[in-house]
Amino acid sequence: MTDSTIFDKIINKEIPADVVYEDEHTLAFKDINPQAPFHVLVIPKQRIATINDVNEENAHLVGNLYVVAAKLAKQHGFAEDGYRVVMNCNEHGGQTVYHIHLHMLAGQAMGWPPYQNKKKELF
């Protein structure tokens, strides 16, 4: 695997993070540049670089990210009002750390579309 990512360093406790959840397979911590009142990153402890690298052997780790998101939503009291989870893939998808992660955003109503930049339709 390539050089370690910032998430590998957080998992290995080499750099600090404001951790809100941890289990054997998953870690969730506050985003350092929050885009909502509640914004955490939910990551598998095993690095999977992009969504394109998800396969039958590691798919359970991705499913667990959503289980953790649902637990956090209930724990923090916004499961009923709603929340958003987003996973970016590669450069054009907005991925900046090549270790898959859910952005979990809550605490305010989310608009749609999430951006106002109108681009040419692809299909």
Image (cartoon, rainbow, N blue to C red):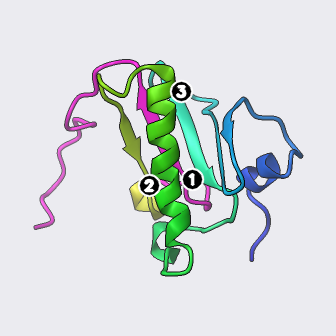
Q: CA distance from mark 2 to mark 3?
A: 16 Å
Rendered location of residue 76, percent (x, y): 50, 22
| Disc 2 residue crowd, few under 14, some 14–19, many 20+, Cα 10 Å | some
Contact flag, marks 2 and 3 (Cβ < 8 Å): no
Image quadrant where residue 24 sits: bottom right
* Residue depth check, mark 1 versus mark 3: number of the one nearer the observer: 3
| Disc 1 residue crowd, few under 14, some 14–19, many 20+, Cα 10 Å | few
Instruction: Mark yes or no: residue 76 visible.
Output: yes
- Looking at marks 2 and 3 on the same chain, the residue that comes earlier in the sequence is marked by 3
Q: Nearer the viewer, residue 46 or 122?
A: 46
Residue at the image point whose x is 45% and y is 62% from the top: 89
**Placement of 7 over or under 75, stated as above or below:** below
Image mark for residue 96: 1
Instruction: Say which residue label 3 marks.
Output: 34
Q: CA distance from mark 1 to mark 2?
A: 9 Å
Residue at the image point whose x is 52% and y is 67% from the top: 60
Instruction: Say which residue label 2 marks.
Output: 88
**Placement of 5 over or under 81, stated as above or below:** below
Identify the magenta region: 95-123
What's the amino acid at mark 3?
Pro
